[in-house]
Image (cartoon, helix red, strand yellow):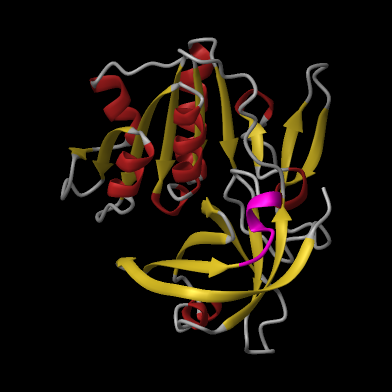
Amino acid sequence: MEKYDLIARVLSNESIAENVYQITLECVDAALCAKCGQFVNLYLKNESFLLPRPISICWIDGAKLTLVYGVTGKGTKELSAFEFGDQLRMSMPQGNGYDLSMMKEGQTAMLVGGGIGVPPLLELTYLLSQKGIKVITVIGFQNEPFLMKPLLKAGADLYVATDSGKSGFHGTVLDLIEQENLSADAYFACGPKPMLRALTEYVLQQEKDIQISMEERMGCGYGACVGCVCTIRDKSGLEMKKKVCKDGPVFWGSEVVWDAR
């Protein structure tokens, strides 16, 4: 797909949880080229930040694009200071998103997210619900949940877990799934690698399909620096290196080699 390098205008940029921000950008053609599960590369004002910041797409609404990001360093700290009317250089779409073609009306999908891996599930929840698919969304956080109301509005049958027990179920998302005896025809996930691995092993034991969005740390975000490689095993058993930013970030759980070095 052709990639767009464009200037977006900031419509809002606000904190929605501790060190978590939601930014909405106005950008022509966004809805036409963006796909659920993809990400965008954002360029900051400070020229000392040579590399863009890859941020996953949370919500697509006409010419408006909403992203949710964690403030984890100097780059995202600067991003959190952008205000209404500021302009931001952005390239999109980046990476490959979720494949929804395998889901049929009347089926059930389970969406599982952890921490800053939750935002991509909002657009995914909405799209699956619009196809007449029941969507069970299970999200987990260390302490403070976010995006619960938008997920409910998008059509999620929502379950929440926290490590601290401050909100929702006290434990992991997998603990919650097992306690509630939740099941689905297919699974979609995004979050930290330990969560993705545990969930994938759980789902594959049930002989169900799962698509996972890998959260590997990216350097350039374009496939040039080879800083985000993972190992994939194809159907013939052949192992190969893949770039999360270019070949992913979404892969089938069954093809990821978790113990590869």
Q: Residue 167: x and y, percent?
A: 17, 47
Q: Residue 227: x and y, percent?
A: 73, 59
In the picture, the quarter occupied by the C terminus is top right
Q: Residue at x 46, y 68 (%)?
A: 23
* Residues in magenta, as a range: 27-32
Could you say which is closer to the camera, residue 247 or residue 233?
Answer: 247
Could you say which is closer to the camera, residue 73 or residue 149?
Answer: 149
Q: Give the left or right position of residue 197, taking residue 236 as reference.
A: left
Q: Give the left or right position of residue 201, taking residue 229 as reference.
A: left
Q: Quadrant of residue 255?
A: top right
Q: Residue 49: x and y, percent?
A: 66, 83
Q: Residue at x 58, y 76 (%)?
A: 9
Q: Residue at x 43, y 73 (%)?
A: 12
Tell me if residue 29 is in the magenta stretch: yes
Q: Residue furthest top?
A: 207
Could you say which is closer to the camera, residue 53 or residue 84?
Answer: 84
Q: Residue at x 62, y 81 (%)?
A: 44
Q: Quadrant of residue 64?
A: bottom right
Q: Looking at the image, is 142 positioned above or below residue 66?
A: above
Could you say which is closer to the camera, residue 119 or residue 260?
Answer: 119
Q: Looking at the image, is 155 positioned above or below residue 108?
A: below
Q: Residue furthest left?
A: 166
Q: Looking at the image, is 14 positioned above or below residue 171?
A: below
Q: Residue 42: x and y, percent?
A: 64, 71
Q: Give the left or right position of residue 179, taking residue 51 as reference.
A: left
Number of numbered discs: 0
